[in-house]
Image (cartoon, helix red, strand yellow):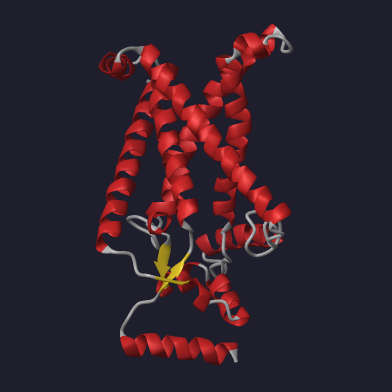
Amino acid sequence: MPELERVAMENQEQASGKTRYFLRFTSGQRYLHAVLFTTFLGLAATGLPLRFSESVWARAFARGVGGFGAILFFHKLCAAVLTLAFLIHVKDIFTRKLVNREKGIFWGPTSMVANWKDARDLIGHFKWFLGLGPRPRFERYAYWEKFDYWAVFWGMVVIGFSGYAMWFAPFFARFLPGWALNAVLVIHSEEGLLAILFIFSIHFVNTHLRPDSFPMDMVIFTGVESEEEFKAKRPMEYERLVREGKLEKRLAEAPGSWQINFSRVVGYTAIVIGMVLLVLTLTAYFG
């Protein structure tokens, strides 16, 4: 019966000539992501001049914004906003699990927690790259999306703690030895640099520049994707929803032209800024 339902829906879509759209991200998730990437760009744009303060471009940037003191102020501001957004997200996760008793948060096909299927998909992907097997069929989240997600938690713990340890050094000096405060400076600098290089290269390529998303995957901005995209990128999730009779509940309105244009402006701006910062980072690091 589910198979007949799927065929009937596809025939109906083809007959009407109208593309159906399905919800992937809620407005709350999109807003939180907007805060995340905005503050991360801000942290990168202010952290790199502090890291490479002797570079010509860093000194020019500092002169343009009122000095390195102003850069440090905006760096701390972005850090505080990002921390607040992170805590809101963590609170939302535990509220959904402990209060609302929502299933599938920490395990299952809709969870961001890695499982054995992700390991098999990773191996299968390498085989597919080498022409040794078929392309893996993904569920709601692919293994690299889960890696990106948990990288934020790693960054908040390592980069965040080291940053706050430097910000509030007199407080942390009460229970941390002097060598630890010196170490956090190195940790914050190098881990922050690693995060910038990862986001502006690996994450941008995986999300926007791979063939099935090029030149940009706008689902994180619009929240919806076409049925064709849905079936091509996450066939296992699509088939599961059909099987469970939940596919129709995910139907959504097609994004308006203003929403698409706005998403393109925001997305391309973020990518351009990221690429410029990546080039400046590599130039300063190896120069």
Q: Nearer the viewer, residue 35 or 279?
A: 35
Q: Is residue 286 visible?
A: no
Residue at the far front: name it: 99
Instruction: Check the image and report above or below for 275 versus 160.
Output: below
Residue at image position (54%, 24%) is 190
Residue at image position (41%, 66%) is 225
User: Toward which corner of the image does residue 60 lie, by quadrant?
Assistant: top left
In the picture, which quadrant includes the N terminus? bottom right
Residue at image position (40%, 89%) is 12
Residue at image position (57%, 66%) is 138
In the picture, which quadrant includes the C terminus? top left
Q: Looking at the picture, how far across and down is residue 203, in whole percent?
A: 47, 46
User: Toward which corner of the image does residue 216 lie, by quadrant?
Assistant: bottom left
Q: Nearer the viewer, residue 129 or 39?
A: 39
Instruction: Check the image and report above or below for 3 versus 79.
Output: below
Q: Looking at the picture, how far across and down is residue 281, in whole percent?
A: 39, 27
Asked if residue 279 lies left or right of residue 198, the reply is: left
Q: Is residue 272 visible?
A: yes
